[in-house]
Image (cartoon, rainbow, N blue to C red):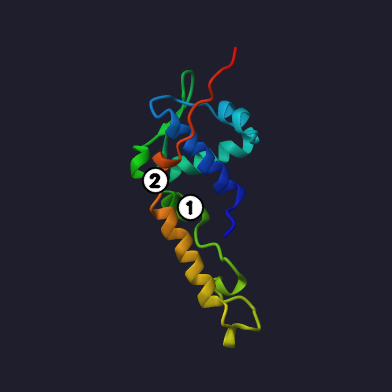
Amino acid sequence: MRLTSFTDFALRTLMRLAGEPSRSFATSEISAEFGISRNHLAKVVRDLADSGFIATQRGAGGGFVLARPAQSITLGEVVRKLEGDSALVECFRADGGACVLTPRCRLKTRLAAAREAFMRELDRTTLAECAYPARTKRN
């Protein structure tokens, strides 16, 4: 399985918020800490807010926080929401793709089983288990 960079950035952001759940973060802070484009991260934050994972507040003193406890958010839920029904391989597309192996393919069922195993593992893992704590400052 390969996740999009968009989902990767979203998971990193959520993990960071879970590390300090009572604190509000700014897009610029997360983008600098993880080396992610601020504009790209702004889109990630918007999608996370639209999906109900984070709550945002605009203006001075604004920022974003987890919308619910990290223990109640599974990685599987996040991945499903952000990845949607993206096809693992061509024959998984809604239209079936144009693979010439489809009529007698023995790979598709195994790939489907592997994807389900991957998602089951993510469903068993909460954001709290993957929280990324603040870096300690060195003097």
Residue 40, given in percent of the width and then of the height, sits at: 62, 39
At x 66% / y 83%, what residue is drawn? 100
**Chain-order first, disc 1 or disc 2:** 1
Total marks shown come to 2
Q: Is residue 136 left or right of residue 36?
A: left
Q: Is residue 7 above or below residue 106?
A: above
In the rendering, which numbered label is found on residue 126? 2
Q: Give the quarter of the image for residue 2.
A: bottom right
Identify the residue at the far bottom of this view.
104
Which secondary structure, mark 1? helix
The residue singled out by tag 1 in the image is 79
Disc 1 versus disc 2: nearer the observer: 2
Residue 56 in sight here: no
Where residue 5 is drawn, which disc sits there?
none
- The location of residue 9, given as percent across then percent down, is 57, 42
Location of residue 139 with respect to 8 vertically, above or below: above
Q: Residue at x 50, y 67 (%)?
A: 114
Quadrant in which residue 103 is drawn = bottom right
Closer to the camera in the image, 98 or 8: 8
x and y percentages locating residue 138 in the rendered image: 59, 16
**Which quadrant, please, contains the N terminus?**
bottom right
Q: Quadrant of the C terminus?
A: top right
User: Residue most toward the front?
Assistant: 139
Q: Residue at x 50, y 26 (%)?
A: 134
Residue type indicated by callout 1: Val
Mark 2 neighbour density, 10 Å: few (under 14) some (14–19) many (20 or more)? some
Q: Is disc 2 placed on a helix, strand or loop?
A: loop
Disc 1 and disc 2: Cα gap in Å?
A: 12 Å
Q: Amino acid at mark 2?
A: Thr
